Image (cartoon, rainbow, N blue to C red):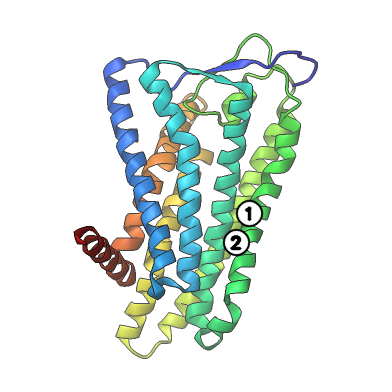
């Protein structure tokens, strides 16, 4: 914080000042948050208790659901509190903490999506070696590497950001502490940090996206050579859920980085982040469960077990 002796208190403008619209936003975000947490926790519980889901694919899905739960929890509850109480202030430490965890979880998710695509590549292209290549030890190490990579990506700009100075204007034009609006209100020279943030974000997105693309190019080539249509459909079905989630995740990044004009930049970022932090984490459990026979069977068995226990 430079030479300032006291840390500033920021004001988050949110999405709108219209009370009726705020009520609608509050209801929408509350419902989507509860569905998101419930859905992702259900996926985690199923992968822990059901023997049919003790495979590398579901191991990675469990960690992905855990990340989604953390990501939406960092973003949404604070905004719900602001909407319900009218208190738009947030302390410097809380703002920096939120910023740190948002980027940590987001970066880790991108690396995990790349690992999940590699898992599908090994399962379809090298099925005889799948159990050896994707054993429990390797899977655990890959997840740890995702967290380490996510931390390394955000560490340099975070260290530089802690030295920023904030003068008299502490109003952040957003509903959460995002990098761009926070940097805009700093009275320090932020050019280098801004370029670093963009460079690391693009490097992470493009790097992981290339891994996903290369994995699926190999997968498609292998599937095309399958002799029967049934084998092809089964192979595609195992990848469809992951492909949908990848499309949603990377699609939102395109909207953030490809902006039509500077005038619409803030509005678009707010809208995309609302969808990314609330709708996407809510949809992902349904995408994996509705399109996956094993998950549906595991969920049905879990409900039956709970029903039997409750009747005793």
Q: Residue furthest bottom?
A: 227
Identify the residue shown where x is 32% and y is 45%: 35
Q: Residue furthest top?
A: 168
Residue 143: numbered disc? 2
In this rendering, position of residue 27 left or right of residue 241: left
Q: In this view, does 78 lie above or below 153?
A: above
Identify the residue shown where x is 54% and y is 82%: 131
In front of the other: 247 or 163:
163
The picture places residue 172, in percent across and down from the top left corner, at 54, 20
In front of the other: 185 or 99:
99
Residue 16: numbered disc? none
In front of the other: 190 or 76:
76
Q: State whether residue 293 appears in this view.
A: yes
In this rendering, position of residue 249 left or right of residue 307: right
Determine the secondary structure under disc 2.
helix
Determine the secondary structure under disc 1.
helix
The picture places residue 3, in percent across and down from the top left corner, at 80, 16
């Amino acid at each position: 914080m430079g030479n300032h002796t006291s840390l500033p208190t920021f004001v988050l403008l949110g999405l709108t000042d219209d009370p009726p619209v705020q009520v609608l936003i509050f209801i929408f975000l509350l419902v989507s948050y509860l569905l998101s947490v419930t859905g992702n926790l259900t996926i985690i519980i199923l992968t822990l208790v059901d023997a049919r889901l003790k495979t590398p694919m579901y191991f990675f899905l469990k960690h992905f659901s855990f990340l989604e739960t953390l990501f939406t929890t960092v973003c949404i509850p604070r905004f719900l509190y602001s909407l319900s109480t009218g208190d738009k202030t947030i302390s410097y430490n809380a703002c920096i903490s939120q910023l740190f965890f948002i980027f940590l979880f987001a970066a880790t998710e991108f690396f995990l999506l790349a690992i999940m695509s590699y898992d599908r590549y090994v399962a379809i292209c090298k099925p005889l070696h799948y159990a050896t290549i994707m054993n429990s030890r390797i899977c655990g190490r890959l997840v740890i590497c995702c967290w380490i990579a996510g931390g390394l990506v955000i560490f340099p700009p975070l260290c530089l950001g802690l030295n920023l100075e904030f003068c008299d204007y502490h109003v952040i034009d957003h509903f959460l502490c995002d990098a761009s609006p926070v940097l805009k209100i700093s009275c320090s020279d932020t050019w280098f940090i801004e370029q670093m943030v963009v460079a690391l974000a693009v490097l992470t997105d493009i790097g992981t996206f290339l891994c996903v693309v290369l994995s699926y190019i190999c997968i498609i080539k292998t599937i095309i050579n399958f002799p029967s249509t049934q084998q092809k459909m089964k192979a595609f079905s195992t990848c469809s859920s992951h492909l949908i989630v990848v499309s949603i995740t990377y699609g939102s990044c395109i909207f953030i980085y490809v902006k039509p004009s500077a005038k619409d930049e803030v509005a678009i970022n707010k809208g995309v982040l609302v969808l990314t932090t609330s709708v996407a984490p809510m949809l992902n459990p349904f995408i994996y469960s509705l399109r996956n026979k094993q998950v549906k069977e595991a969920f049905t068995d879990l409900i039956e077990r709970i029903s039997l226990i409750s009747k005793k």
